[in-house]
Amino acid sequence: MWTGRHINGAGVAPRMTGKLDRATLTDLVLSRTGATNPDLLAGPAFGEDAAAIRVGGETLVVSTDPISLAAERIGQLAVTVASNDVAACGGRPAFLLCTVLLPGADTDLLETVTGQLDAESRRLGLTIVGGHTEVVAGLDRPLCSLTCLGVADRYVPTGGATPGDRILLTKGAGIEATGVVATDFRDRLDLPASTLDRATAAFDDLSVMPEAAVLAPVATAMHDPTEGGVLEGLIEMALTAGATLEIDRDAVRVRDETRVVCDAVGIDPLRVLGSGALLAAVDAADGDEALAALSAEGIDAVDIGRVVEGEAGVELDGQRYTEPIRDDVYALWDE
């Protein structure tokens, strides 16, 4: 929920594009959250995907996310990213509020964006209940910001992992980046049409609602990796949990088309837009049963590491990561 997604503005340095650094986010955003309310069960925090609010006897999970860089499938991606945040916290996504900002009065562009919003919402069983649409000076591409709401039987945080837990990853690393690079940067890819078609099909495999529903009853923590990919998602899990995550790169699944597309533009599949995967921490005793339950639903998943006591961070490839990283894909937009 509070990770500074896709912000690029005056006075924010040194990054040109991407998440705010943790210190800036903490000082200028997380410290300024208005009045307190006893019905807020889980509020603004670094790395957490969504808020939890007590409404009567229910727990309402709410998240908001903007998409401002990926252009070709922005409407579809916006629906998936917003609903994934709610699902990753154990919620059942149900309703959407959509804000669409356009660079000009282009009805063809508006038709494309709203058509994607409508189609993906119908595919995932979500209802658009309102929003706002306008033309904004200074934009060079459309921007979508969606708020998703859903009820949870059990709220699952990003930061709930404890030493001894196993870390599971569904589907694979870099799925979102596979589709984005294959569409937005197609002219840079000297790849067969069949490979590009498989890569573009990644957009239809970005929802984590099915696997989140399977894992929510047993997971100690869940997180859907977005910017910075699987590695950044793991870093956020580690920092919010105050523990060390030991990760085996060889265990992380990378689809063939993802590896080919990433190699073509020189980016690391573990450090790029990661929607489509779900990271989960489960008690070691529940790990095999959780993997079996996912398999029974036709969902690929692997055990990629474990949680141990130690300084908060991620150990991968002999390196230790204790601070957020920048997504490799952003360099392509910055060129």
Image: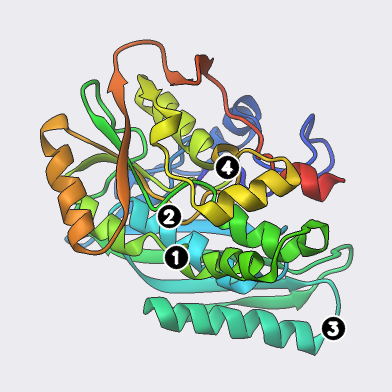
Contact check, label 2 and label 1, Cβ < 8 Å: yes
Residue receiving disc 3: 105
Which mark identifies residue 235?
Answer: none
Contact check, label 2 and label 4, Cβ < 8 Å: no
Of 170 and 314, nearer the camera is 170
Q: Residues within 10 Å of mark 3 (few under 14, many from 20)?
A: few
Which label lies toward us, 4 or 1?
Answer: 4
Residue receiving disc 4: 269
Can residue 91 be spotted in the picture? no
* Distance between mark 2 and mark 4 Cα atoms: 21 Å
* Distance between mark 4 and mark 1 Cα atoms: 28 Å
Dot 1 lies on which element? strand
Q: Say left or right for 203 vs 105.
A: left
**Residue 240 location (% of width, % of height):** 40, 28
Q: Say left or right for 218 vs 222.
A: left
Dot 4 lies on which element? helix
First reached walking from the N terminus: tag 1 or tag 3: 3
Q: Quadrant of residue 282?
A: top left
Of 293 and 250, nearer the camera is 250
Q: Residues within 10 Å of mark 1 (few under 14, many from 20)?
A: many
Q: Residue at x 39, y 65 (%)?
A: 149
Q: Residue at x 42, y 44 (%)?
A: 253
Q: How many marks?
A: 4
Which label lies toward us, 4 or 3?
Answer: 4
Which label lies toward us, 2 or 1?
Answer: 2
Residue receiving disc 1: 148
**Residue at the outermost top position:** 310
Q: Say left or right for 184 vs 151.
A: right
First reached walking from the N terminus: tag 4 or tag 3: 3
Q: Residue at x 42, y 64 (%)?
A: 207
Hey, what amino acid is under mark 3? Answer: Ala
Residue receiving disc 2: 85
